[in-house]
Image: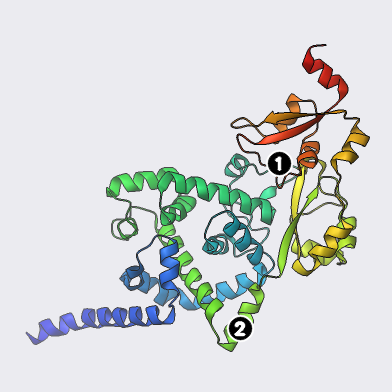
């Protein structure tokens, strides 16, 4: 009997240790309720022994990772959060970007995924990012975030739960679909079971890492500890973004902002030339929020009157965007330039939606041609 008790004791001690740590984990991170609810995970998962074990082993390492990522991402985190919120997504998806890249602007994986959201080239192109010999918009923090938001939204429409979105983003849609079929369930704890291995170990770790970093980040936002206050100052919202049109000289932007070129480029690592590329149409750049008013007074993008004068347009006709039509498609139909459609309609982005009304500037010759003369 004594031998049996001695044999059981180590296991009982382990279970007791895990239980005590789980209790401390819930107390240490009161933000866990909010985080897990945002990702559609049951809040009781804070006591899951596999998650507790992950945190036990990795908490110090990921605290350091969080701190280093915050230093690199202090200029983009507020803007990412604003973009996500404006797009109807939880701002917690910023921790997915942190997990993917640590906010390294030129991050590239061994599988050739690139940028802060780690897009593969084919997926990037699918979501209207330009990836070619001249430009790679996966490294554009704003364009890539907008593409990631569209991808995340598409995944949610397909799978219907936010934790499934995270899983699919990491291991792929097809692999997740096969995992759900094998498990006969899409429940979080079923798919995350390390014994059944429905999803890859890498993906299970990916979900655990996002949950832990989210709990850390949201706890720091509410914390009053001096060491957390120092970290918090790095993510105070002090940045915003503005649109600039193709062909704009970077030196003119720097002058309008009253910044040095190195300061501007550090805030906009996607810019690699002396001008906004002519075929970029419309680009969003990041600027200090306190400089926005002065910038808008000094930076004057071309107007409809300007392009009428310089391009010899004489007519303005209406066009209703069809499903799947791009800015290039519409411009090609009317023998006009995509950038002129952006200017004429004061578009906030180069992405069109079905049913959208566009005013198309055209020449007299094009107008007569369309009338059949």
Question: Residue shown at 50%/45% (left/top)?
Answer: 154
How many numbered marks, from 0 up?
A: 2
Which label number is shown at residue 229? 2
Question: Residue shown at 69%/42% (left/top)?
Answer: 130
Q: Element type at marker 2? A: helix
Q: Report the quarter where the C terminus lies.
A: top right
Which residue lies under the disc numbered 1? 132
Viewer-proximal residue, 204 or 160?
Answer: 160
Q: Position of residue 315 (x, y in %)?
A: 84, 28
Residue at the limit of the structure toward the top, as seen here: 373
Position of residue 334 in the picture relative to residue 44 (left or right): right
Question: Residue shown at 83%/21% (left/top)?
Answer: 366
Instruction: For label 1, count other residues whose C-alpha is less than 10 Å away and answer few (under 14), some (14-19) or many (20+).
Output: few
The earlier-in-sequence mark between 2 and 1 is 1
- Is label 2 or label 1 in front? 2
Where 118 falls versus 347 (above or below)? below
Q: Position of residue 353 (x, y in %)?
A: 62, 38
Q: Is residue 317 visible?
A: yes
Question: Residue shown at 57%/64% (left/top)?
Answer: 98
Position of residue 244 in the picture relative to residue 129 (left or right): right
Q: Position of residue 31 (x, y in %)?
A: 45, 74
């Amino acid at each position: 009997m004594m031998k049996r008790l001695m044999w059981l004791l180590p296991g009982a001690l382990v279970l007791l240790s895990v239980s005590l740590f789980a209790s401390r984990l819930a107390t240490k991170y009161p933000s866990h309720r909010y985080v897990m609810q945002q990702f559609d995970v049951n809040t009781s998962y804070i006591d899951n022994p596999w998650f507790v074990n992950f945190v036990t082993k990795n908490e110090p390492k990921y605290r350091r990772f969080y701190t280093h990522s915050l230093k690199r991402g202090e200029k983009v985190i507020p803007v990412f959060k604003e973009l996500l919120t404006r797009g109807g997504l939880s701002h917690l998806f910023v921790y997915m970007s942190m997990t993917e890249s640590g906010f390294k602007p030129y991050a590239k994986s061994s599988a050739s995924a690139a940028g802060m959201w780690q897009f593969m080239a084919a997926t990037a192109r699918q979501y209207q990012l330009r990836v070619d010999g001249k430009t790679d918009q996966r490294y554009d923090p704003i364009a890539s975030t907008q593409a990631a938001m569209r991808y995340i939204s598409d995944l949610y429409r397909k799978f219907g739960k936010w934790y499934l979105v995270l899983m699919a983003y990491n291991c792929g849609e097809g692999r997740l679909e096969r995992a759900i079929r094998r498990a006969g369930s899409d429940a979080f704890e079923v798919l995350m079971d390390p014994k059944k291995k429905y999803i890859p170990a890498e993906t299970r770790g990916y979900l655990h890492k996002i949950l832990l970093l989210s709990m850390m980040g949201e706890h720091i936002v509410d914390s009053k500890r001096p060491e957390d206050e120092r970290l918090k100052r790095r993510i105070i919202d002090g940045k915003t973004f503005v649109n600039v049109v193709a062909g704009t000289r970077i030196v003119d932007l720097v002058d309008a902002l009253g910044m040095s070129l190195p300061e501007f480029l550090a805030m906009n690592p996607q810019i690699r030339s002396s001008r906004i590329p002519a075929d970029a149409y419309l680009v969003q750049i990041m600027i200090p929020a306190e400089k926005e008013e002065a910038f808008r007074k000094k930076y004057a993008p071309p107007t409809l009157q300007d392009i009428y004068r310089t391009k010899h347009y004489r007519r303005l006709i209406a066009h209703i965007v069809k499903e799947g039509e791009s800015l290039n498609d519409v411009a090609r139909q009317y023998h006009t330039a995509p950038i002129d459609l952006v200017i004429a309609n004061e578009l906030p982005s180069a992405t069109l939606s079905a049913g959208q009304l566009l005013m198309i500037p055209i020449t007299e010759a094009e107008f007569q041609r369309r009338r059949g003369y």
